Image (cartoon, helix red, strand yellow):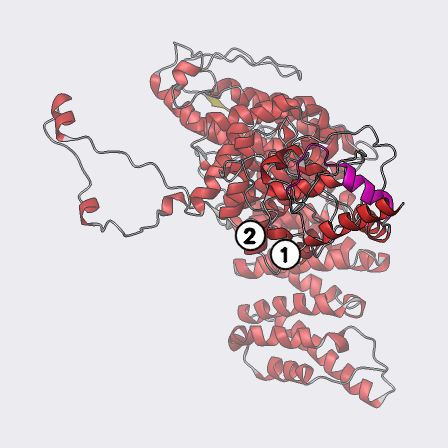
Amino acid sequence: MAPSCPPDLRVLCRKLTSTPPELLPQQLPALTHNVLRCKDVLSVQHDVKAKEDASISALVHKLKRSITTLLDGRNREGRFVAVVLIKAIVDVGGWEILRTVGPWVNGLLAVVQKGDPIASKELAVVAITRIYILVQPYQTLIREVVTPTLPAFGAACVQLLKANTSTPPHVSETICDALSTLIPHHPATLRPLTSQLRTAVRPYLAPTCADHLYVPANLSRAARRMVIAMHFVAAKSSGSDEWNKLVDTILRDLHQTADQVLRAVDESWQATGGYDRTRVSTDGEPRGGAESSPEQLPSWSGVTAGAERLAGLFAYLEETLRCSTKSAVTIPIGAYLDAICRISVIARLSPKTQTWDQALDTNASVDRDEKDDLWSSIPNLHVAAMSLLLTMIQRLESDMIPLVPEAVDHLVRVVKSGMSVASIRSIGYRVLNQLLSIAGLTMPKIIVDMLDPILGACCRDLQQDAGVLKPVEKQVPSSKESKKNGSSVALANVDLFLQKPDSNVSDSTLKLEPAHRQAAAELLATLLSSLTQAHLKPTMRGLIDKTAIVTVNHDAMLSSVLNPYRDQRGRLYPSILPYFCRQFPNDQGLEILRSNLRTSSINGSSDLFASFQKVMEEQEQQEENREVETDADDEMADADVPSTERDATGTIKRGDLSQLGPLASLPKNSSAEISQENPFAARAGVEDNGFAAVASDSPPKRKHDGADAAMPAKRLEVEKLEERPRATRAAAAAVTKPEVEDDEDDDSDVSVHLNMELEDDDDDEADE
């Protein structure tokens, strides 16, 4: 059944024909929404013979004719509106619109080539690229639409890129994205333009402050992707060779630039990937690049500009790993890690007590100003190197496992050196999170101990961001100390005297950036789920749990509950499940935890969790013990108290209760008799420090001589079991010992029911 004619189609036709072109841009948002609501009638083929379909077909044809008139007209506003409407109609029309889109493509090309406003040119580039991508499934449309117009479109894009002074950066970015999308689909058609495109985007690949053009990071990223995609235009199967050639060129430029930038340092780095360092002259400023050669990047001079070029080349290497390739390629992982190592070894192991000159061997022929420029640029280089390492881990995944120890070594050295820099800590958290995700459970304890500075920094950042951890206030020196130090005037902040003591002013400097906060929160959860908890120190695990609680980190708290901590002696530490229940009472996973979590009834037991099968077996065993009540149990109960003395009433003296045996031999009672004890309450004899091991306060179990022939214990009905002291419960345990001894003076004050049963048993024996 054909769709009915929507009123939006009639509104479009009326407004496009009756409204002057100068006023159409004001109504463009409403017109675009009308086009989107006409999807059903624009994407189907109409039968001209049917009356209703004939009217709809006439309106669609009128709409197309109106848009074509605006596109070919002389009014710039009309052409701008036509470009926007063409893009909207192509998105919703499908094949029915694409088969007649040829005249529109020619009109859009005219907009790109002529002197229309830059906004119209950018939208035209987007619309043409969209049309080229949508016609890919239809070979006939490719021959009719793409093949005749693509060379002209590529040439127009090259002209816009070359005019970098008049073309805004966002337009150049759009053009680079469009070409990087089209090159894999039409490599043969765009092959003649590759050399011109490389020359046009050369200033965007690794920009520096020495350039006369400002290049945003998004434009650099788009230009790198376009250049990397050019290996698709290689003839036959040489695409992988072109890709490897590009990577080799980037690595050589990187090491040549590092030779100049790092000439103030006597490097301890030893090359292993075939790119060795060379000796450079220390005369003048460090410099590199070449303006004359189109194959090299633009020239630069100065340490700051060289450091920016190095960071740009590291980002260039990242894009080589992110972008797809024409065929399988061989990634030089060793060369990538070699470049990371060269930057990572320039670090301070003790930044609080060491200066850069003390931590590194420097070149005496380099002046102080150049060294200071280098020290200030090192954090940016560290961030660039760690970003490349992060991309390698994300791209290679499990193939990076053999290189995890080396990666951890670089990571720890960089983070410790730049602990005070927020960007280094943020990228360090992300790198460590990825490393733990692929190889956390295989890390030995020695590597886990190396991560303590990063773990502590992660917890400190989150606690400071949550307002829990306050910065240490520096004490103002007193007047006596000032005079002693030779200063007659003591400096103090006057505003502190005007501030009320109870006022709580939030320190905005402690707040983290959203990306930094997210990286730290994700790492906190990964530490509890992807790391062997036995390798952590008890204090570090306690700090992680505390941070998860005070920052209300759901994933971290859940991981802590599911991965309990046991120390080297096998002692189980308390769970934070009560805090999780309090902060997330409506969480769906909480009910599963409540049904599956079973805390041991014996203190110090290592069995924190019990499976459903084990719980069912225990319940069945309890039911059998309740049904089986034999006379042998009574004999065992009578013979199990040989060393106690009964008084005249037949009860056991309280002074001898300590001789009745351990509490572990108590019989299993029914659920109605067991007191509802809180499993998370503080244990007796354990210091309440919030994170202490649960130690067992019961003596060890004793095995009796007749243990092999022991019968199931008889149920003892005890009244008011909760009111009895612990020693009285030990008496009930002693009654169930399987040793048989005759003692007529035994007594018991366990309960009236127990006394009655014992007296009945004695009468039966006397009758026999």
Label 2 is placed on what type of residue? Answer: Val
If the image is split into quadrants, where does the C terminus sit?
A: top right
The percent position of residue 294, horizontal first and vertical second, equals 59, 30
The reply to whether residue 466 is in sight is yes
The percent position of residue 633, horizontal first and vertical second, equals 82, 44
Q: Are marks 2 and 1 in contact (CB under 8 Å)?
A: yes
Q: Nearer the viewer, residue 263 or 507?
A: 507
The reply to whether residue 194 is in sight is no
Quadrant assignment, res 496: top left
- Which mark, residue 360? none
Q: Is 208 included in the stretch rendered in magenta?
A: no
Q: Is 633 included in the stretch rendered in magenta?
A: yes
Q: CA distance from mark 2 to mark 1?
A: 9 Å
The percent position of residue 200, horizontal first and vertical second, equals 58, 40
- 246 vs 725: above or below: above
Mark closer to the chain start, 2 or 1: 1
Label 1 is placed on what type of residue? Answer: Val
Circle 1 SS class:
helix
Q: Is residue 686 left or right of residue 43?
A: left
Crowding at dot 1, Cα within 10 Å, few <14 / some 14-19 / many 20+, comes out as many
- What residue is shown at x 71% (from left), y 75% (from top)? 64
The percent position of residue 376, horizontal first and vertical second, equals 40, 27
Number of numbered discs on residues: 2
Span highlighted in magenta in the image = 630-647
Residue annotated with mark 1? 125
Residue annotated with mark 2? 171
- 521 vs 206: above or below: below
Crowding at dot 2, Cα within 10 Å, few <14 / some 14-19 / many 20+, comes out as many
Task: Work out which residue is located at the far left of the displayed protein and give it.
Answer: 488
